[in-house]
Amino acid sequence: MEGTVFTPSLEGMKFVKSDEGEMLTKPFLDVCKLVLPVIEKLGAAMVLVKSDVGGNISRLESKYSSNPSEFNLLYNMVRVEIEAKTAKASSSCTNGLLWLTRAMDFLVELFRNLLAHPDWTMSQVCTDSYNKTLKKWHGWLASSSFTVAMKLAPDRKKFMEVIGGTGDINADMEKFCADFSPFLEENHKFLDSVGLDTLKAS
């Protein structure tokens, strides 16, 4: 693998904003997609996250494909649903964007923990990241499934070797967190401004 598992997403992030500084749908979803291989390497521990992220990307992509010019800007999907009063539906793109952003928050926190706590096991890294991000939005059922899954986290050393490739994994991971976090913060700000950043899961 040329570079690390983060190399393609670091490249892709350069195209997420339009010249006017607005979030573009396809480039944002493409970067999220490029994070999927990292989730895969976490194996059984992240099956739930992977299917959740994959499902939300697909939902947003099919909406985008239905009218690429109208939905070229990411937040247009949400605005259309707010007007139609469908934004709060569980199958809405608004809900898809919210949960995709939250899952990415969790992953960024996970990468930060890997950098900040070299002595932690993978299971500790995952659990702490979950507690800081997704846990408050999950009900008992989702939370229990997650807690069980975290125990299946792979060996940390093996995981780092697998995602490292030929590049400097720590530098790339740090850059990924630094560059990707502002996009996620912007999503939260936008969803919060329209009163939709608080939806919970059962």
Image: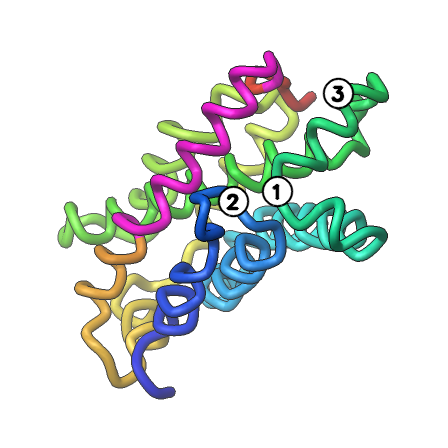
The residue pinned by badge 3 equals: 82
Assess whether mark 3 and mark 1 are in contact (beta carbons under 8 angstroms): no
Q: Which residue position holds label 1?
A: 74
Residue 142, by quadrant, is top right
Position in image of residue 188 (x %, y %): 48, 27
Give the main secondary structure, helix, strand or loop, of the magenta stretch.
Answer: helix
Q: How many other residues sit within 10 Å of disc 1, few (<14), some (14-19) or many (≥20)?
A: many
Q: From which residue to which does the magenta span run?
A: 177-196
Q: Amino acid at mark 3?
A: Ile
State yes or no: residue 155 in magenta.
no
Q: Are marks 2 and 1 in contact (CB under 8 Å)?
A: yes
Instruction: Find out whether residue 185 is within the magenta segment.
Output: yes
- In this rendering, position of residue 54 left or right of residue 31: right
Q: Gap between marks 3 and 2, in whole Å?
A: 18 Å
Q: Residue at x 24, y 45 (%)?
A: 113
Q: Nearer the viewer, residue 159 or 71?
A: 71
Q: Is disc 1 placed on a helix, strand or loop? A: helix
Query: Horizontal and vertical percent for residue 64?
Result: 75, 51
Q: Which residue is mark 2?
A: 23
Q: Residues within 10 Å of mark 3 (few under 14, many from 20)?
A: some
Percent across and percent down for residue 145 are: 60, 36
Q: Residue at x 52, y 25 (%)?
A: 190
In three-dimensional space, the C-alpha distance between marks 2 and 1, rounded to whole angstroms, equals: 6 Å
Quadrant assignment for the C terminus: top right
* First-in-chain label (1 vs 3): 1
Nearer to us in this view, 107 or 122: 107
Q: Secondary structure beneath disc 2?
A: loop
Of the 4 image quadrants, the one containing the N terminus is bottom left
